Amino acid sequence: MLLNIPDWPAAVPLQPLSFDWSARAGLELAVLRMDLLDPLLGGNKWFKLQPHLRQAQRAGAHGLISLGGAHSNHLHALAAAAQRFGFASVGLLRGEPQDTPTVSDLQAFGMQLHWLGFGGYRARHQADFARDWLQRYPHFQLVAEGGSGALGASGFADIPQLITQQLAQLGWSDYDGCWLAAGTGTTLAGLVLAEAGRHPLYGASVVPAGYGVEQQVRQILQQAGHADAGYRLLDASRGGYARIDRELAVFIAEVEQAGQLPLEACYTGKALLALRQQVEQGMFARGTRLVFLHTGGMQGRRAQQSLLRRHAAQSSLQAISHE
Ligand SMILES: *Cc1c(COP(=O)(O)O)cnc(C)c1O
């Protein structure tokens, strides 16, 4: 089978994780390293793409079309997967042409790029948008922005089993919940369905309230005939999607310097910082065992690097001048 990746537990290890703040609160932490799955296909985007790729394969599609911004983890994974599994790929990009590390990779993966401007990109929800592009690229399959929706959500069905299989290595008999970043909320909804009430999910939303995450999660659960329950959504956006502030930059630098976990600023960094804040506010009882999902996205880190460095450097200068 084309899409099978052998030995999932070895490729997506569950690792123990400990910080001074988690230890103080008596919280036991582990991280599911989705980011380690594959150098190019790692992260939650691969799980959302899998069902689309299977569908495209069954339908005999020639290629995949999708949408995103100039730093999109979704387009990056889609272009890499298309190249690996023999599909053509077309990327519809938001805004005006720009060079980013992500865009260079998309081109290297052979993705055909179309820059839609900002107005053109907003038209993506109109009925004729998909029709027009599919006329231009017949026999292509359209994948929603961010790989969102019920089909993408179905790609997480095996995750609870992947966690459970590895619990013994941590000396855990069970876990009390999973904590993860939410963008469109598709991954969160997929895990709620996969857990079917066995363990609660905590979605740290990296987009502010009112941007549709709540509805998206609810809609996917409804479509699947599942109650709108089994999860909590918390605001981890820090004032805006992709906004990087100094506290976040310093946090990421500290976690990395301690050799614990690579993070980026848009998703995993914000999600873990939100967890720390909630833990410090006493959200979890002592003895709680939580799995943090590392959803990947490290390719996006390249464009954040200089800002992260600048913030972290400024803050160590301040620390010196305050001594
Ligand atoms: C896209 C992304 C998310 C959000 O996933 P959704 O399914 O859209 O909620 C989380 N983490 C990373 C690293 C991502 O790239």
Image (cartoon, rainbow, N blue to C red):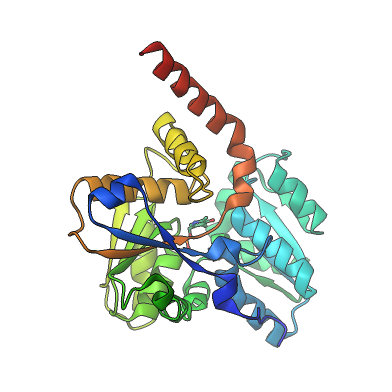
**Where's residue 256, x and y in %?**
51, 43
Q: Residue at x 42, y 15 (%)?
A: 320
Q: Residue at x 31, y 76 (%)?
A: 174
Residue 321, image x, y percentages: 41, 11
Q: Is residue 207 visible?
A: no
Residue farthest toward the top in the current orientation of the protein:
321
Quick one: quadrant of the N terminus?
bottom right
Q: Is residue 177 left or right of residue 100?
A: left
Identify the residue at horizontal 19%, vertical 46% (top origin). Answer: 281
22 left or right of 93 in image = left
| Camera sees residue 164 | yes
Q: Position of residue 155 (x, y in %)?
A: 52, 76
Q: In screen coordinates, is 296 left or right of 192?
A: right
Q: Is residue 204 above or below residue 15?
A: above
Which image quarter: residue 118?
top right
Which quarter shows the C terminus?
Answer: top left
Q: Please state which of residues 66 and 7 is positioned toward the viewer in this rendering.
A: 7
Residue 322 placement: quadrant:
top left
Numbered disc total: 0
